[in-house]
Image (spheres, rainbow, N blue to C red):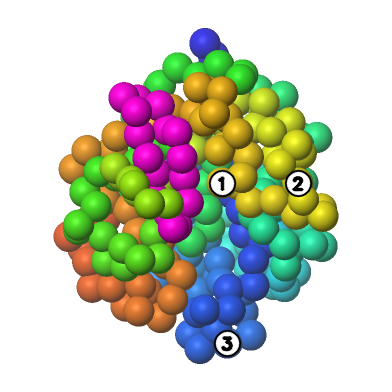
Amino acid sequence: MADIRQCVILAAGNGRRIASVSGNDPKPLVMLRGMPLLEHVLASAHEAGIERFFVVIGYRGDRIRRWFDSAGFDNVDVTWIENIHYQRSNGVSLLKARDFLRDPFLLLMSDHLFEPQTAKLLLDRPVSSEEVLLAVDRKIHSAFDLEDATKVSLEGEHIVDIGKWIPRYDALDTGMFLCGPAIFDNLESAKVNGDCSLSDGVRKLGRAGKFRAFDIGPAHWQDVDTPETLAYAEAVFDEHFHDNPSGRRFARV
């Protein structure tokens, strides 16, 4: 299988729960350790080997593009994809990237911190065009906000259910997916009244035995969705993400 060097980043939501920190800016531009969240994601994915990015923007996407243009990332290949229906679920945002992708790709969230080595290991896993792999965390009780986390139920390496409120779960969704292009057909078929979440689409793959788990082991990740999780990420950054690239290092590549 050819190396996977392309990545979709979902950055379209309006981030209502972190609005007291973000003010008028979209959530991907919320600052953490002197860098916008989106820059952390771009830099870590680039460190893992990603060469081409497709970033789906919506809420105040013009501000995100202006930030990027002024940041001096001349050697970073980014295609911007507009989602005017950003109020809908994240599956709609991913579907906006459908015309740009024919081969497997890495899928990331613009508000999830991760270690580059984790993404690199995920990218090394085999995935067919019909499958999706999700990086999962079995360290359930170390989660900062377990109630808000998306949970997954496993049978061996297969994911059989996913959601925030499922009754039985074995691990947590880290927001890092390795997707075959079949994800798009599953999202389309999961739509109800023009809306669908990413979980809706991969749940269908799970029922077909084509949704598998990649255990991140001792690695760290953090969803930054509220002022509380932002403060927590700031507090643990040096311990958990000390190997992540800096903004200056990213700008020079």
What secondary structure is marked by label 3? loop
- Which SS class for mark 1? helix
Rendered location of residue 62, percent (x, y): 75, 69
Q: Amino acid at mark 3?
A: Gly
Query: Which residue occupies 82% across, 62% down?
Result: 84
Which residue is located at x 24 percent, y 52 percent? 140
**Label 1: how many Cα within 10 Å (few below 14, some 14–19, many 20+):** some
* Nearer mark to the viewer, of 3 and 1: 1
Whole-angstrom CA distance, mark 3 to mark 1, is 29 Å
Which comes sooner in the sequence, label 3 or label 1? 3
Residue placed most toward the observer, 224 or 184: 184
Q: Main secondary structure of the magenta part?
A: strand
Query: Which sits in the foreground, 139 or 104?
Result: 139
Is there any visible trace of residue 74 in the rendered image? no
Is 58 on the left-hand or right-hand side of 116?
right
Left or right relative to 117: residue 125? right
Q: Position of residue 223 (x, y in %)?
A: 40, 61
Amino acid type indicated by mark 2: Lys
Sequence-first tag of 2 and 3: 3
CA–CA distance in space, label 1 to label 2: 11 Å
Q: Magenta segment range?
A: 150-165
Residue plotted at (69% across, 33% down):
186
Q: Circle 2 sits on which residue?
A: 191
The residue shown at (31%, 67%) is: 145
Q: Which residue is mark 3?
A: 23
Amino acid tagged 1: Ser
Decide if residue 41 is in sight here.
yes
Q: Which residue is mark 1?
A: 199
Q: Which percent across, then down, holds residue 3?
A: 51, 19
